[in-house]
């Protein structure tokens, strides 16, 4: 089994964009990080680390409270999705919906607004 850092590799754009492209420029999160761990199961059924590279080439999140900003942590429950759909159908803006859910959920919110990404 081979586990790598989420910033492994480099982003390869699929096509060149125009300079005056009205679309928001995407943030590229790949830094070519070489940090990884490789493990394998021995004949006795125990896991053995066969390779480990600890060094990252980027800043790590230093506080567990900031882990919610990881892409893997950005998710919504079915109830939150249903609530967003219902509020959206009532012509409530996305920012108002986000503020409402954030106030209602307090620290349990598992997604972030586009402005923070």
Image: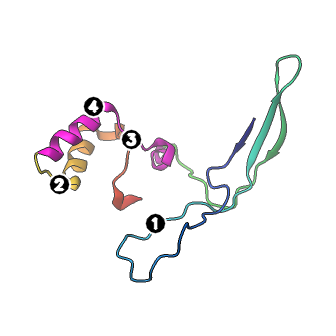
Q: Which of pointers 3 and 1 indicates the residue nearer the eye?
A: 1
Dot 4 or dot 3, earlier in sequence: 4
- The alpha-carbon separation of the residues under discs 1 and 2 comes to 23 Å
Report the magenta stretch's main SS: helix
- The alpha-carbon separation of the residues under discs 3 and 2 comes to 20 Å
Instruction: Count how many numbered circles sit on residues in the image.
Output: 4
Q: Which mark is residue 110?
A: 3
- Magenta-colored span: 65-89
Residue bearing the label numbered 4: 79
Q: Quadrant of the N terminus?
A: top right
- The alpha-carbon separation of the residues under discs 4 and 3 comes to 13 Å
Residue bearing the label numbered 1: 26
Q: Which of pointers 4 and 3 indicates the residue nearer the eye?
A: 4
Dot 3 falls on a residue whose secondary structure is loop
Rendering coords of residue 21 (x, y %): 39, 77
Q: Residue at x 37, y 50 (%)?
A: 112
Residue bearing the label numbered 2: 93
How many neighbours does mark 3 have within 10 angstroms: few (below 14), some (14-19), or many (20 or more)?
A: some
- The alpha-carbon separation of the residues under discs 2 and 4 comes to 18 Å
């Amino acid at each position: 089994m081979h586990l790598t850092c989420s910033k492994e590799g480099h982003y390869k754009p699929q096509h060149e964009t125009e300079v005056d492209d009205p679309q928001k420029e995407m943030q590229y999160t790949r830094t070519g990080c070489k940090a990884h761990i490789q493990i394998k199961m021995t004949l006795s059924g125990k896991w053995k680390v066969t390779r480990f590279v600890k060094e990252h080439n980027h800043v790590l999140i230093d506080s567990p409270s900031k882990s919610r900003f990881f892409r893997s942590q950005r998710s919504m429950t079915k109830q939150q999705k249903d609530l967003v759909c219902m509020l959206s159908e009532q012509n409530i803006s996305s920012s108002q919906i986000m503020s409402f859910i954030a106030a209602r959920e307090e620290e349990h919110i598992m997604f972030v607004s586009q402005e923070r990404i």
